[in-house]
Image (tube, rainbow, N blue to C red):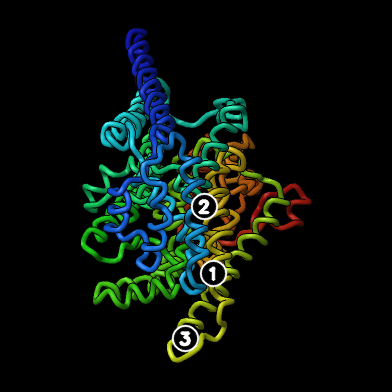
Amino acid sequence: MSEPSSSKISLLTWIRGSGFAAFVVGLSVFLASVTLSDYRITGDTLQELAENGVIKEEHREALFAELAPLEGTYYSSVRAFLADVDRKISETNEGLGDGSQIWEYDRGEYKQALARAAATGPVPDRTTLFFWLSLVLASVGAIVSFVPKIWQSTAGIKNDGVFFSSAKSRGFWGIALGVFLIGFYIALYFFPAYIVNWIRLGDPVSQALRGRPADRWFFYGMMYTVVLLVMAVRMAVHYRHNRYQLVRTASISFFQLGFAFLIPAVLESMNKPAYDFKNAWPLDYDFFFDWNINNLTSGGAFGWFILFWGIGLAVILVPLFSYFFGKRWYCSWVCGCGGLAETLGDPFRHLSDKRLKAWKVERWIIHSVLVFAVVMTGLVLINFFSGQSGEPLFGQATPKIRKAYGFLIGSIFAGVVGTGFYPFLGNRVWCRFGCPLAAILGLVQKIKSRFRITTNGGQCISCGNCSTYCEMGIDVRWYAQRGQNIIRSSCVGCGICAAVCPRGVLRLETGPEEGRYNEVSLVQLGQGRIDVV
């Protein structure tokens, strides 16, 4: 490719700068929008809540009676509004019987619904305008800032000073991003009432796909998908020299957009169970919960199909595909968690801990989570079937275990830590240390699989690029120097080690099981030889 002229360079630089400026403006509008509301409960507010069914019928009369004195009161702060609402919910509980108390989850949902219904101001009144000025503008701006790099730099990964970047190596901007991500997940999971304006920004898309306003999970799915797709453009530009990375990035974008976002939304609009057909147990840890089984079995033929599909995916397809292709078929080509890690998390992959101590900790934690998930699911199923003919075998112990798993693993580990800690610990924290499905895939890959990364030790120059960019904390160079195949259970087969190798030492392969383990003899190493056995 010929060198671009100075005028072309100037134009491309201007385009990149304009795109970045648009991104900053859109992000600023998004951040500011969460505060642009006042709150006032009116008769119409309570009527709206009564009609949409958010407030349960057994709570409605008592709660509305307690809220009535707040009608017409003006609040300029969501904190003051929610403090009064929370107090009224507590007073409602005092008058309710033990069997009809407003439990903690319902309390959070009621506060969120009241905050949304009572909000007035620029964002509630002009939601579509703010949607375009924030999410759309920021997304388009980011893409425009990425694309000119195709002509401004040569393809290929080289020493680009990544460890000296404030944003990418735990500097000020990296810490700021990490704090924002952690705060976003905490607010989304535990304090959604404080971000109702953000949730409202999903209304235009939700109305188009489902025919109703967005809830927090639709908003989260939309944000997740948008960020993944935008960063997939950056990923494609960054690794445009490598066909494997381009196809893999297209695959994770397709599965996230289609299977994780659009299909569930369309199914919901048809009053069918909203199901992500690629989400396998135990990553989809609540698949075998009683409420989900009841929902599916009462959903007609389609519900039964989902039930059998989910069982078949976990029991048959996951181990079968892992035998032929290793865990990469799911973790790096299909999974939404892996998709976000590969796109949004790509700038932080070098931060993964490569020490032996980290590897030992990793094995203990991830397999402990797997045991936790298996035991919890077993107890849930025993309780479900034993409860069909009488008192459940384990009584109230099972719901407590289920709640503990959902809070500790589903929310804190997978969400707050798994994504929020990208700028601190690298992009595969959840996949490496917590995902129970990754643990199962890894066991199959290690024990019975055709996948391996082969190495040509005679060509290795020990540059260390492979180890630096390994997101799973594998010291790839150690294997490459010895010409030893890489068959680690943690390897997700992302192929970045091969993409950044300047000598073509590494190659992702599937072949006969025979010869996968070509461990280097200690005797041969002592003699200075690198023959493999």
Label 2 sits on residue: 87
Quadrant where the C terminus is found in the figure? bottom right
Q: CA distance from mark 2 to mark 1?
A: 29 Å
Q: Residues within 10 Å of mark 1 (few under 14, many from 20)?
A: some
Q: Is residue 329 visible?
A: no
First in residue order: circle 2 vs circle 1:
2
Of all residues shown, which one is farthest toward the front? 69
Q: Is residue 240 left or right of residue 450?
A: left
Would residue 486 be visible to someone looking at this image? yes
Number of marks drawn? 3
Q: Is residue 51 above or below residue 70?
A: below
Residue, disc 1? 402
- Please report the residue visible at 47 percent of the width from the left and 61 percent of the height from the top: 92
Q: Residue furthest bottom?
A: 389
Q: Which residue is mark 3?
A: 387
Residue 96 locus on image (x, y percent): 48, 68
Quarter of the image where one finds residue 515 = bottom right
N-terminal-most mark, 3 or 1: 3
Q: Mark 2 against mark 3, which lies toward the viewer? A: 2
Residue 28 % position (x, y): 42, 27
Amino acid residing under circle 2: Arg
Which-is-in-front pick, marks 2 and 1?
2
394 to the left or right of 385: right
Along the viewing direction, whichever of 529 and 27 lies nearer the viewer? 27
In front of the other: 319 or 384: 384
Give the SS element for disc 1.
helix
Mark drawn on residue 442? none
